[in-house]
Image (spheres, rainbow, N blue to C red):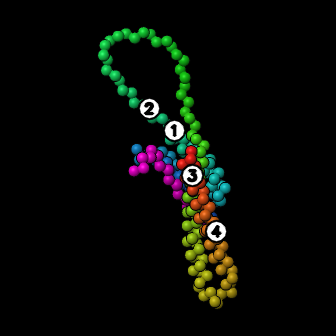
C-alpha cells in the first residue's frame, strides 16, 4: 500500500538486566526475509554501537541490482553489420549505501527502542506506585517508596522524550536526504 520495495522491522525487549534488539529486512515483492541481526546491550551507547556495526551488512542487501530485462527486436532485413571495434570493458561499480540512509535507520531504531523502554518504565511505574499505596501510612520507608515512584516516573519521561526526539530526527533525515 505504501509502494515500498523493502520493509525493515525491529523489536527491542528486555532479558534480565540487558535489552535485546532484533532487526529484520523483508523484500516486499516476494515477502522473503532478506536478513536480520540480533544483539544485546545495556545502554544507549552500546545500542548505537551495535546498530552501527550490524546495520551496514544487513541494509547492503538492498543494493543488489536486479538483472535487466532484455527485449529482442525482430529482424527487418538481414544485413551483416560491420565488425565492431573492441572497446575496453569498464567494470560496473556499485554505489555504496548512502551514509544518511544508514544514519536515518539507526536513529529510527534507537528512537523506537527508547520509546519501548519508556513504555516498559511506565509499566514499572504502575507497579512501583501500587507498591507505594499498600499500607502507606504504616510503612517506615514511606519517603523511600515515594522517591522510587518519582525516580521511575522521571526515567520514563526521559525515555519518551529522548526517544521521540531521536525518532523524529531519523524521520527528518529520511525526508531531507
**Residue appearing at x 58%, y 37% in the figure:** 96
Camera sees residue 2: yes
Residue 133, position in %: x, y?
A: 59, 84
Q: Earlier in the sequence, mark 3 or mark 4?
A: 4
Q: Nearer the viewer, residue 142 or 5?
A: 5
Q: Earlier in the sequence, mark 4 or mark 1?
A: 1
Q: Earlier in the sequence, mark 2 or mark 3?
A: 2
- SS at mark 4 in the image: helix
| Residue 175 in the figure: left or right of residue 147 | left
Camera sees residue 40: no
| Proximity of marks 3 and 4: CB atoms separated by less than 8 Å | no
- CA distance for labels 3 and 4: 25 Å
Q: Nearer the viewer, residue 75 or 21?
A: 75
Instruction: Residue 155: give its label.
Output: 4
**Residue appearing at x 57%, y 51% in the figure:** 172
- CA distance for labels 1 and 2: 12 Å
- Magenta residues span 1-16
- CA distance for labels 4 and 1: 39 Å
Q: Nearer the viewer, residue 170 or 57?
A: 170
Residue hosting label 2? 67
Q: Residue furthest bottom?
A: 138
| Magenta segment includes 6 | yes
Residue hosting label 1? 63
Instruction: Residue 172: give its label.
Output: 3
| Residue 29 in the figure: left or right of residue 24 | left
**Residue appearing at x 42%, y 9% in the figure:** 82
| Camera-nearest label, 2 or 3 | 3
| Proximity of marks 2 and 4: CB atoms separated by less than 8 Å | no
- SS at mark 1 in the image: helix
Magenta segment, prevailing SS (helix, strand or loop): strand
Please tell me how crowded label 1 is: few (under 14), some (14-19), or many (20+) other residues with Cα within 10 Å: few
Res 68 quadrant in image: top left
Amino acid at each position: 500500500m505504501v509502494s515500498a520495495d523493502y520493509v525493515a522491522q525491529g523489536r527491542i525487549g528486555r532479558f534480565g538486566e540487558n535489552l535485546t534488539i532484533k532487526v529484520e529486512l523483508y523484500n516486499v515483492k516476494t515477502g522473503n526475509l532478506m536478513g536480520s541481526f540480533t544483539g544485546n546491550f545495556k545502554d544507549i551507547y552500546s545500542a548505537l554501537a551495535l546498530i552501527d556495526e550490524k546495520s551496514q551488512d544487513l541494509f547492503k542487501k538492498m543494493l543488489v541490482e536486479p538483472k535487466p530485462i532484455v527485449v529482442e527486436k525482430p529482424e527487418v532485413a538481414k544485413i551483416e553489420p560491420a565488425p565492431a571495434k573492441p572497446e575496453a570493458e569498464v567494470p560496473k561499480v556499485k554505489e555504496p549505501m548512502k551514509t544518511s540512509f544508514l544514519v536515518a535507520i539507526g536513529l529510527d531504531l534507537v528512537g523506537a527502542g527508547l520509546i519501548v523502554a519508556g513504555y516498559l518504565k511506565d509499566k514499572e511505574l504502575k507497579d512501583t506506585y501500587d507498591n507505594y499505596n499498600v499500607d502507606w501510612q504504616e510503612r517506615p520507608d514511606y519517603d523511600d517508596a515515594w522517591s522510587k515512584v518519582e525516580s521511575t516516573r522521571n526515567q520514563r519521561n526521559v525515555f519518551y522524550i529522548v526517544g521521540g526526539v531521536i525518532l523524529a530526527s531519523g524521520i527528518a533525515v529520511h525526508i531531507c536526504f
